[in-house]
Image (cartoon, rainbow, N blue to C red):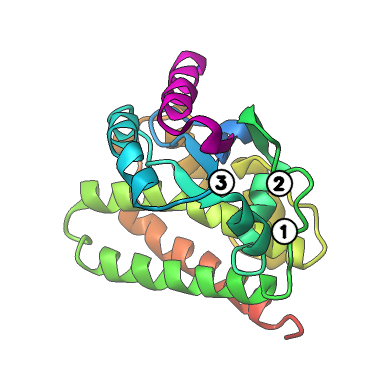
Amino acid sequence: MDKILNQLVERLQKAFGERLVSVVLYGSAAAGDHQARFSDYNVLCVLSEIAPRELGASTAIFRWWREQGSPAPLLLTENEVATSTDCFPIEFSDMQQHHQLLYGKDVVSTLVVDRCFYRAQVEHDLRAKLLRLRQKASGMLADVDLLRRLLLDSVSTFCVLFRHALALHGAEAPPRKRDVIQQASRQFGFDPLPFEKLLDVREERTKAREIEPVPLLGAYLEAISKVIDAVDRLEK
């Protein structure tokens, strides 16, 4: 992947020149918890300005990057990085803890993350993801393959949010998903088995077809609800 990342940086440099401030790898790849079949390579691209000219210059690059199997890089100006931490404390906290500078100025390490809305964002994201999961699962109970894929795709997001729920409670918040589930199950009192079985598939310890998703769904939803309740009870 280093070769592809280098190609991305070269294309960004050619497209933006001196307007390219920084290129940062973040997410599971930067944290050393990347699973090739399920994880993306997340990249932050920081520019001095973003106008239609920059959006047009990024089109071909972002299309090529998506063809490599990852989402388009996140485009922000340097000023937006510095002033958006109160809106996105989860994302910037994660980025600050685990990132790799690929090019230019390190705009992340010295960032001051404003956590005034941190608890509210964690609860909001947990509730929103739970609602979305329920809505999708309601139409998939008769199709175990679709339901299995839904759970496999969602578990990474809930591991991230559980890690932040742990941090809000002053508990250890480890970077690796499996460690997060173990710590969160003790802290919030839920059965870790559904998450562990899904992580076994993502880590290629077992085959996806060996997982029966319908029996897992109830305990999975119950665990998420317990974490939401614990975050909701924190002082507002």
Is 17 a magenta residue? Answer: yes
| Label located before the other in sequence (1 or 3) | 3
Kind of residue indicated by mark 3: Ser
Q: Which residue is mark 1?
A: 186
At horizontal 52% and vertical 57% (from top left) the residue drawn is 158
Spatial separation of the CA atoms under disc 2 and disc 1: 26 Å
Kind of residue indicated by mark 2: Gln
Nearer-the-camera pick, 50 or 63: 50
- Please report contact status of discs 3 and 2: CB closer than 8 Å, yes or no: no
Q: Is residue 148 visible?
A: yes
Q: Secondary structure at mark 2?
A: helix
Disc 3 residue crowd, few under 14, some 14–19, many 20+, Cα 10 Å: some
72, above or below 114, in the image = above
Magenta stretch, main secondary structure class: helix
Disc 1 residue crowd, few under 14, some 14–19, many 20+, Cα 10 Å: few
Quadrant in which residue 130 is drawn: bottom left
Q: Which residue is mark 2?
A: 96
